[in-house]
Amino acid sequence: MRASLVIVGAGPRGTGVLERIAANAAELAPGTGLDIHLVDPYPPGPGRIWRTEQSPLLWMNSRAEDVTVFTDTSVEMAGPVREGPALHEWAGLAGDAFVGRRVQGSYLRWAYRRAVAALPPEVTVHHHPCRALRVSGPREGRQRVWLADRPRPLLADLVILTLGHLDAEPDEEQAALGAYARDHGLVHLPPDFTADSDLTPLRPGEPVLVRGFGLAFVDLMVLLTEGRGGRFDQDTYLPSGREPVLYVGSRRGVPYHSKIGYRLDGAPPPLPRFFGPAEVDALLARPEGFDFRRDVWPLVEKELGYAHYHRLFGAHPERTGFGWGVFERAYAAADDPAERAALVAAAVPDPADRLDLAALDRPLAGTRYPSHEAFQAGLRRYVEADLTRRHDPAHSPDLAVFGALLSVYGRLTRLGDIGPWWHGFFSYLASGPPGPRLRQMLALSRAGVLRFVGADMGVRAEGGVFRATSPTVPGFAVEARALVEARLPQPTAARSRDPLLRELYAEGAAATPDGLLRVDTVDGRVLDRSGRPHPRRFALGPHTDARGAGAFTRPRTGGPAFRQNDAAARAVLTFLRAPAGRAAA
């Protein structure tokens, strides 16, 4: 019987693993006959999120030149580099174009076909367009992968779970809100992938409360405005009359920062400087473990500050008080945040040129507006200022910090689960919407279709309606018969609606306190609750504690997901080459 590998999830992450198997096969398992079974109800390549059958109004939030699914020499991996075109090169587009998700889906479909074509002739790929329900089998023997449409399982020497973003059962708060909505004839849309949500219950002209101001909200905003026949005429929105009135708020109370609209001229900051491989090794070597806020964040904060000031002193020396060499030596020696703050205050006269990460994270902290209308005008000014700054090279230290965020993210993947705060902070600063989307947001606000609620938005179910308030506007409240949670479900093994992942957890797979599947951070082997890696089961992606920045990334930025894909592929091929693996096969 030929060797068999089952990959559950045929989207971009599964495609990336397939590409790495093709790249490494000649070295690690030459001549090995192998059947690869891809299990996914959605098309191989794009998968669910990037499928081509979705609204053409939905965009990527990255420029076409910032998207690749191919490795390059910046990826720290053992396997060979197999370069390929970035999205803009493949599609023949300008690098700064923001394309629709359907274009990305076509790119991923092409990348999948290319990966299959690159496999050795003795390797065959089979796609099963259905769901995997369960994985069973002994640690030292063949695994059985049970599918929804067949009574007998697929037999597999190894299984890799590349499940992507998954639906989840509601948590306690969401379950209570859903029950209240059913009892009172209201509408409650829990966290979901917006393109899959049924938005028809949100009726024209009626208020809708929306919690979440990130990318899921941007999709919702588009589908409920342009998607209902409205249109934008430059900076003016012309309603169709079919739109609801969206009242949006969140923890921060502001939208994610705009994508930066210029390129960095000159050399980027030399990173890593204060948070590199040696620092990560030291954290991992601590027998007592580490705490993100106490032990990791100070290193990250110093690294981001270094990138910011390196660029400020190099590109805009007229806005600094003394030379870079003096500043750099003092900055490197200053481990205490208060000492660094005093150094920066002495060296950088204008507070607008200083990096204040706490203020960036909570821009409305302590801010109060006398009325709801005053806040609308105030937040429009905030968004306009953000758009101006993010498109002005005079503020190029912002772009240097963006590069440092990517560098830091690549290092943090080695530390496993570091809690949800960092991922939200990274997305807020580095993975926000294109500038045109924020300009549309301003037009909708001026048209009265979009209303801002404020920071720390609270929602209560009372009096037969949902009621929203925020300390940003004391005394203001808005009531509505519809509430939308504009965010993806939190990945959690215990509450996942994916039966395979849920059963894996129930049978003893380890999970973090936040519900992420624990895996070996190098090659993705699934860990049990005693910390033992499973010899035949792997998991990669956002449902694990080794989640990287995404299944694809910007060219020449190291791509932590690519490194993980390569390690998993090499572990699979090495297993199949070994005598024990061949005997099992």
Image: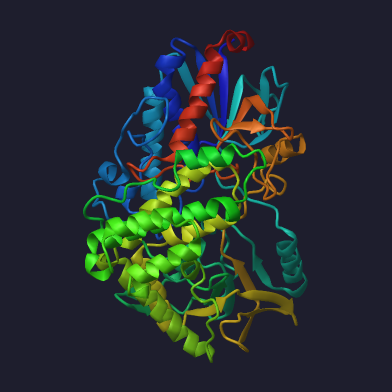
Residue 80 occupies which quadrant of the picture?
A: top left
Q: Position of residue 516 (x, y in %)?
A: 64, 45
Residue 317 occupies which quadrant of the picture?
A: bottom left
| Number of numbered markers | 0
Residue at image point 58% right, 61% down: 198
Towards the viewer: 263 or 320: 320
Q: Is residue 518 visible?
A: yes
Q: Position of residue 312 (x, y in %)?
A: 29, 62
Q: Residue furthest bottom?
A: 370
Q: Position of residue 185 (x, y in %)?
A: 72, 73
Residue at image point 41% right, 83% down: 446
Residue at image point 49% right, 85% down: 375
Residue 250 drawn above or below residue 570: below
Residue 103 drawn above or below residue 226: above
Q: Quadrant of the C terminus?
A: top right
Q: Is residue 546 visible?
A: no
Towards the viewer: 175 or 541: 541
Towards the viewer: 10 or 274: 274
Towards the viewer: 405 or 280: 280
Residue 233 occupies which quadrant of the picture?
A: bottom left
